[in-house]
Amino acid sequence: MRLAGKRAVVTGGAQGFGAGIVRRFVAEGARVLIADLQADAARALADELGPQADALGVDVSSDQSVADMARQVGGLWGGVDILVNNAGIGHAPQPMEALDPAQFERILAVNVRSIYLTARHLVPGMKAQGAGAILNVASTAAVSPRPNLTWYNASKGFVVTATRSMAVELAPHGIRVNALNPVAGETPLLKTFMGADTPEVRAKFLSTIPLGRFSTPEDMGNAALFLCSEEASMITGVCMEVDGGRCI
């Protein structure tokens, strides 16, 4: 029960890595708000996990939607101890000049603007209570970028730099900020990154991961638990690879 009594918000928490983090946090005693654009999926997971989980439909790219979430969380719990910025989207592999402008803007909105918006609306409460833990989900794409994913890679590079800058700015307020850099995992985004999900494409992708498997939601839940727990009380500004050795 390493998160007993903690109040956590997990964006994009209805499926994939986010759901793995939500499940682990609830198992360790946290009260968790599953904030997801797919409100029905968020509610289904909350119903499965019981009274420690709540669900809310949230568009993390919208200032108004994130502001509404912050107000509801304040009314429910009086504050937040842990924020996990997990929501994110990718794009299919393609030459950098071929990506549609609307898709480029959507990637920036979900992967970049969302972190600004959650900070804008939730960090003041953390400052007021003098404590908090923020975890941003970046990617190995920020550290060892693959070709034909340039704009996704760049959006995750922002997450890494933002994490480090947030960490030094918020440390005097008792707020720690870290990130996770997962390799592609068994999530709905896997097909997007690979372009196609065939045995041949999987084998080629896995050949770049020394441990020989994809990241799982459970892997991410375990890493997130550590960085958001008191066991990591001296750790801030770290971007931890959960990648089976991909970035070595």
Image (cartoon, rainbow, N blue to C red):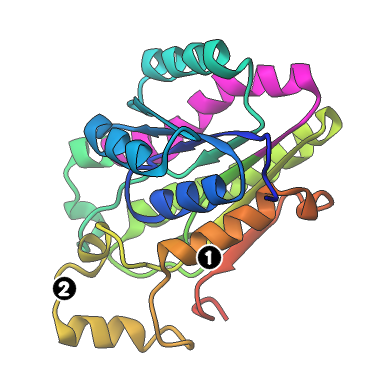
Amino acid type at mark 1: Val
| Residue 194 x %, y % | 23, 70
> Split into 4 quadrants, where in the image is the C terminus?
bottom right
| Residue 128 x %, y % | 76, 16
Q: Is residue 141 above or below residue 198?
A: above
| Residue 113 x %, y % | 44, 31
Residue located 43% across and 55% down the image: 20
Residue located 27% across and 58% down the image: 189
Decide which of tag 1 and tag 2 comes sooner along the chain: 1
Q: Is residue 126 shown in magenta?
A: yes
Residue located 42% across and 38% down the image: 50
- Decide if residue 169 is on the left or right side of residue 201: right
Q: CA distance from mark 1 to mark 2?
A: 24 Å
Is 156 in front, or is 35?
Answer: 35
Q: Is residue 152 shown in magenta?
A: no
**Label 1: how many Cα within 10 Å (few below 14, some 14–19, many 20+):** some
- Decide if residue 231 is on the left or right side of residue 224: right
Q: Main secondary structure of the magenta part?
A: helix
Amino acid type at mark 2: Asp
Residue hosting label 1: 143
Label 2, secondary structure: give it.
Answer: loop
Residue hosting label 2: 197
**Label 2: how many Cα within 10 Å (few below 14, some 14–19, many 20+):** few
The residue range painted magenta reads 106-133
Label 1, secondary structure: give it.
Answer: loop
| Quarter holding residue 176 | top right
Could you tell me if residue 140 is visible in this image? no
Q: Is residue 218 above or below residue 38?
A: below
